[in-house]
Image (spheres, rainbow, N blue to C red):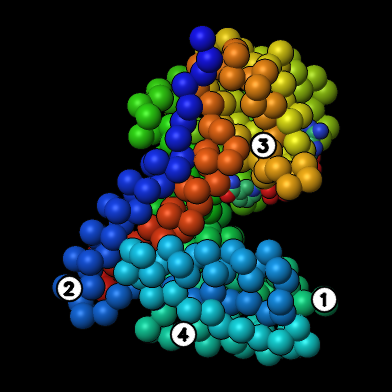
Amino acid sequence: MGAKILDGKALSRQMRSELANEVESFTQSHGFAPKLVIFRAGDDPASVWYAKSIMKTAAKVGIEAVEDLHPESASQGELVQAVADLSADDAVHGIILQEPFPEGVSGAALVAALDPSKDVDGVHPVNAGRLLRNEPGFVPATPLGGLKLLERNDIPIKGARAVVVGRSDIVGKPMALLLLHRHATVTICHSRTKDLAWETRHADILVAAVGRARMITGDMIKPGAVVIDFGTNYEGDKLVGDVDFDSAQEVAGFITPVPGGTGPMTTVMLLWNVLSAAKAAVGG
Ligand code: NDP
């Protein structure tokens, strides 16, 4: 018997429709829609594609999403000023800073100019600190989507042994903290972990956030474990996860497929964050 699929496509559709209802009632009460600005400098194709896909989904749920575009040649000073201007604009509720930034421009300087109350991507150190302390703030959308897949499928987290492979600031670390705050016993693995397979084999909940195609194989998974795969890797035209799906699904109890698992959840969670920012801006 194979693992049950944690279907991110279906859950993202459902959460999109719940969001659309909430946005509609916000807009009716306040006379304006929540507004997201996607800040971008240059024409990186992946960044252009991601911005378009956010705007498409935003339109479906009634959130206004626009781009704030700057030339690749813009200086750090100009870009910092532009972020500060957006931060000061009362009509803007959420801002995301699309990477990559032009050469020589410090991402940290741009993030520092961002008002934490509009940081719907959860990249500002203030929001990272709030997550660390389990205080209300913005959490990066990708790990938030992974958490929703667990919660909405009634997967117990409290007391579970969770192993997160990957320690980036936008996926691995926040996912580890989200699980910790829900009372999992959490281990974080990375490129210097001595015996990765030993660690992963002890996981009730195994999270992969590495960026290496199929590196976690079935023999590294505890029978019945829940596997959350954030990996997005291309093998030619084919999108594959960090988990080797075919061998993993024979052992695991639950698993997110790639595509169709964590991926579809990200944009909808980001847009939920935009609604939260808009609600906070109007005082609740
Ligand atoms: P990063 O490259 O920032 O981090 C990768 C992490 O994996 C690092 O902590 C690194 O360790 C660790 N790592 C690398 N090699 C190994 C190894 N051999 N064994 C154990 N750990 C290793 O990646 P991101 O966190 O940004 O992204 C992770 C994956 O998630 C990628 O596939 C990315 O495309 C995907 N992603 C998916 C999203 C979605 O919507 N589903 C959104 C964002 C990202 P160390 O710290 O020691 O270098």
Q: Which residue is mark 2?
A: 28
- Between the C-alphas of marks 4 and 2, the distance is 24 Å
Helix, strand or loop under label 1: loop
271 on left or right of 62: right
Residue 50 spot, x, y in % from top left: 59, 64
**Distance from mark 4 CB to nearest ligand 1 atom below 8 Å:** no
Foreground label between 1 and 4: 1
Q: Earlier in the sequence, mark 3 or mark 4?
A: 4
User: Of the residues under marks 1 and 3, which one precedes in the sequence?
Assistant: 1
Eye-nearest disc, 1 or 2: 2
* Viewer-side label of 3, 4: 3
Q: Earlier in the sequence, mark 4 or mark 2?
A: 2
Q: Does the residue at mark 4 contact the one at mark 2 (Cβ under 8 Å)?
A: no
Quadrant containing the C terminus is bottom left
Residue 170's place in the image compared with 90, above or below, is above
Question: Distance from label 3 to label 2 (Cα)?
Answer: 41 Å
- The amino acid pointed to by label 2 is Gln
Q: Position of residue 19 (x, y in %)?
A: 31, 56
Q: Which residue is mark 1?
A: 103
Is ligand 1 less than 8 Å from the beta carbon at label 3? yes
Q: Quadrant of ligand 1?
A: top right
Local SS, label 4: helix
Q: Mark 1 is on which residue type?
A: Glu
What amino acid type should be assigned to the residue bearing mark 4?
Answer: Ala
Give yes or no for contact between labels 1 and 2 (Cβ–Cβ under 8 Å). Answer: no
- Quarter-of-image position of residue 182: top left
The Cα atoms of the two marked residues, 1 and 4, are separated by: 26 Å
The dot on residue 241 is 3
User: Does residue 34 appear in this view?
Assistant: yes
